[in-house]
Image (tube, helix red, strand yellow):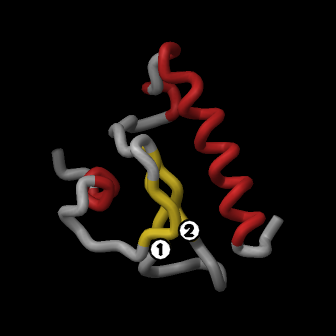
Amino acid sequence: MDCIFCKIAQKQIPAKVAFENERLIAFYDLFPQAPTHILLIPKTHYTTLNDVPTNESALVGELMTTASSLAKELGFA
C-alpha cells in the first residue's frame, strides 16, 4: 500500500508525534494550515469513514475523545 498515513503509523516515515496508543496516532502536519495543526488517524487503514466496519464503531468514539483530550492538553478546548 502506498498510503503516506499508513507509512507514518508504521514508523516508515518519521513524524513529530503528539499522541500514540495501540490504535491511534496523532502527529504534527509538516505543512500546517494553522499555527498548530495535528492529524489524528487510526493505525488501521480506512479509505473513508464509510469503510470502518460496524464492529469497529468504538474506534470513531475513540478518535473523538482523543481529539478532545489533545485539544484540552494543548490549550485549544
Measure how far apart labels 1 and 2 are at the Cα level: 6 Å
Residue with the mark numbered 2:
38
Q: Give the side of residue 69 with respect to residue 56, left or right.
A: right
Most extreme residue toward the right is 77
Number of other residues with Cα within 10 Å of mark 2, as a class: few under 14, some 14 to 19, many 20 or more: many
Of the 4 image quadrants, the one containing the N terminus is: top left
- Residue at 46 percent across and 80 percent down: it is 31
Disc 1 or 2, which lies upstream in sequence? 1
- Give residue 5's position: percent from left, percent from top: 34, 55
* SS at badge 1: loop
Viewer-side residue, 31 vs 20: 20
Residue with the mark numbered 1:
29
Label annotation for residue 2: none
**Splitting the image into 4 quarters, where does residue 36 fall?**
bottom right
Q: Give the side of residue 76 with respect to residue 54, left or right.
A: right
**Splitting the image into 4 quarters, where does residue 45 fall?**
top left
State how many labels appear. 2
Q: Amino acid at mark 1?
A: Asp
Number of other residues with Cα within 10 Å of mark 1, as a class: few under 14, some 14 to 19, many 20 or more: some
- Residue at 59 percent across and 33 percent down: it is 60
Vertical placement of residue 23 versus 28, above or below: above
- Give residue 37's position: percent from left, percent from top: 59, 73
- Residue at 49 percent across and 14 percent down: it is 55
- Give residue 72's position: percent from left, percent from top: 77, 64
> Is the Cβ of the residue at disc 1 closer than 8 Å to that at disc 2?
yes
Of the 4 image quadrants, the one containing the C terminus is: bottom right
